[in-house]
Image (tube, rainbow, N blue to C red):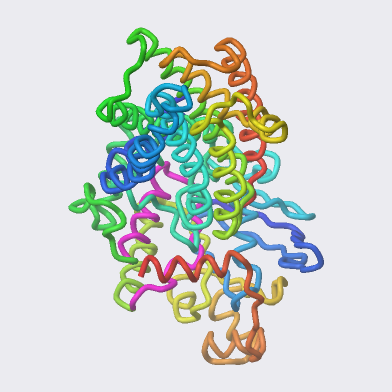
């Protein structure tokens, strides 16, 4: 592990009209660590991930990944990370293998390497036996595992996971974290994840950044956060940092469509 | 290049696997060919225009290509919010390659579907005047497919809600079909309608196909192909530009 941060975020601001989704956020992620972005719904977690993964441009501020400016070196930056979005981005009408294979072509992984990596990763995520089945027949946990496997296919330096355990049952969640923790050893990849489950951040993350209302309110290891707030659990620390009021999010078109999809995809 | 190919292949594979959809999508065109074709046949004949089936078969092929191409592009809306599109948008490849792959895939599917209706029309009794003209007619079909597939990409890039799909169907796709002269001759139309048919690109596609397959053309083949090529270039450029503006 080197000392140079693999991700460096400095004073980023993202506003949508008059709404400040992310307001002057700065942090570093060290190479090889598991970094958790923790915050209530609507705190700005997904917006930050979208900016780091080149899907949104920050209004102001700078983002660096592996020493490259994310806004000006899009293509080079994209080669260096893998991402699993909150909403599935698999093609259900294709098989697991085909989904992997297309990803390999999109990332210019040469055919022999592609085959080899597909096999290694599908075996690692216990999907090898189902490789020729259509993804629409997979359970939620299997789809999520396949997305992570796919995100690792081009051997990225950073893997972004946006709420990777959302909607999974406790068994799948447990299994998911076991996989994620073993990635550092097997792939040497830095993991950047968002979650609003305190116990999960506590369990897997080396360091945690707490974000609320678009602002970073604390950064540190789980122990440091507890110490800072004088609490004995991360949950208590989290509530102390972010307050106890319930957030009413305004429903956007995307949220509505998301609801519809959840019903349709059972 | 391999990126364009794999995204094209994806569209085609998905089409060939959806047998139920293929059969279901034959319903509309069969209705037009069967019910309208035979139902209005005698009136058309008495008006001295010859066989209605002969006349409308190219129109129904054009309709199929229009609907299929538009649908595959609009389906991007679904792909966009909750599916595969995001995966391609964060990949280290130019947006143009993604757009071209998707659009060519959608256009290929539309041509295949058009070919299917062509066969159905042959079974129903449609007879092209010359077999040599059939491959040329398919070039016109391919042009129609690219035009509307690119237009659908342009529209799909901006759509955010499912309701938008209804708008496109009712205010764009249906008028494009009804104004194209697919089911009625372009001669002797009221002036307003005549003007409207002339700004509809499908009109030239159907006219070109009809010219090649039955020898009856309103504008002449040269004008048809020139207009189709021009609109094609314009719509592909528009689609590429709109696609490059997508923010996830």
Judged from this view, the residue extending furthest toward the front is B46
Question: Residue B233: where, in percent of width, then height?
Answer: 62, 23
Q: In the drawing, does residue A112 fall left or right of residue B107?
A: left
Q: In the drawing, does residue A20 fall left or right of residue A187?
A: right
Q: Residue at x 53, y 85 (%)?
A: A234
Q: Residue at x 37, y 61 (%)?
A: A144
Question: Residue B239: where, in percent of width, then height?
Answer: 62, 35
Nearer to the camera, B65 or B86: B65
Quadrant location of the C terminus of chain A?
bottom left
Residue B86 visible within the image: yes
Q: In the drawing, does residue B23 fall left or right of residue B61?
A: left
A141 to A75, vertically: above or below: below
A43 to B16, vertically: above or below: below
Residue B3 visible within the image: no
Count of residue discs: 0
A42 to B72, vertically: above or below: below
Question: Residue B40: where, in percent of width, then height?
Answer: 41, 37
Nearer to the camera, B197 or A87: B197
Judged from this view, the residue extending furthest toward the right is A18
Q: Residue at x 73, y 54 (%)?
A: A58
Nearer to the camera, B224 or B147: B224
The magenta stretch spans residue A162: yes
Nearer to the camera, A107 or B150: B150
Question: Residue B208: where, in percent of width, then height?
Answer: 51, 18
The magenta stretch spans residue A177: no
Magenta residues span A141-169
Location of residue A21 by image quarter:
bottom right
């Amino acid at each position: 592990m080197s000392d140079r941060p693999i991700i460096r975020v400095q004073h980023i601001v993202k506003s949508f009209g008059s709404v400040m989704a992310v307001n002057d956020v700065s942090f570093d992620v060290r190479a090889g660590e598991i970094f958790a972005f923790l915050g209530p719904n609507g705190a700005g977690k997904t917006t930050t991930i979208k900016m780091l993964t080149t899907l949104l441009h920050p209004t102001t501020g700078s983002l660096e990944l592996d020493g490259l400016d994310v806004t000006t070196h899009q293509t080079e930056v994209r080669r260096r990370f893998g991402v699993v979005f909150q909403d599935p981005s698999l093609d259900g009408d294709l098989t697991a293998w085909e989904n992997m294979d297309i990803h390999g072509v999109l990332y210019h992984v040469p055919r022999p390497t592609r085959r080899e990596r597909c096999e290694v990763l599908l075996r690692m995520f216990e999907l090898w036996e189902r490789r020729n089945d259509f993804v629409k027949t997979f359970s939620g946990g299997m789809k999520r595992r396949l997305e992570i496997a796919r995100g690792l296919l081009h051997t990225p330096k950073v893997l972004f996971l946006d709420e990777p355990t959302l909607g999974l049952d406790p068994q799948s969640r447990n299994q998911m974290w076991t996989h994620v923790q073993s990635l550092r050893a097997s792939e040497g990849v830095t993991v950047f994840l968002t979650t609003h489950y305190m116990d999960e951040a506590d369990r897997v993350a080396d360091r945690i950044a707490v974000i609320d209302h678009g602002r970073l309110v604390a950064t540190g290891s789980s122990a440091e956060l507890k110490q800072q707030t004088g609490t004995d659990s991360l949950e208590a620390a989290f509530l102390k940092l972010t307050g106890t009021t319930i957030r009413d999010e305004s429903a956007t078109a995307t949220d509505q469509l998301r609801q519809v999809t959840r019903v349709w995809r059972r | 290049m391999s990126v364009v190919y794999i995204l094209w292949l994806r569209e085609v594979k998905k089409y060939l696997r959806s047998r139920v959809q293929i059969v279901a999508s034959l319903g509309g065109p069969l209705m037009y060919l069967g019910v309208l074709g035979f139902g209005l046949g005698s009136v058309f004949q008495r008006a001295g225009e010859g066989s209605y089936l002969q006349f409308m078969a190219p129109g129904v092929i054009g309709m199929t290509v229009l609907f299929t191409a538009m649908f595959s592009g609009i389906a991007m809306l679904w792909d966009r919010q909750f599916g595969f599109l995001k995966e391609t948008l964060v990949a280290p490849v130019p947006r143009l390659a993604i757009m071209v792959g998707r659009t060519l895939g959608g256009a290929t599917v539309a041509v295949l579907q058009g070919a299917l209706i062509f066969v159905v029309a042959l079974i129903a009794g449609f007879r092209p005047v010359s077999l040599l003209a059939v491959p040329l007619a398919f070039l016109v079909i391919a042009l129609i497919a690219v035009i509307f597939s690119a237009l659908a990409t342009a529209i799909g890039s901006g759509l955010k809600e499912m309701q938008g799909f209804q708008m496109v169907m009712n205010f764009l796709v249906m008028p494009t079909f009804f104004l194209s002269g697919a089911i009625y001759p372009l001669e002797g139309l009221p002036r307003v309608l005549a003007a409207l048919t002339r700004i509809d690109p499908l009109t030239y596609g159907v006219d070109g196909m009809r010219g090649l397959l039955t020898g009856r053309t309103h504008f002449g083949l040269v004008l048809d192909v020139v207009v189709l090529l021009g609109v094609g270039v314009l719509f592909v450029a528009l689609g590429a530009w709109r696609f490059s503006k997508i923010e996830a």
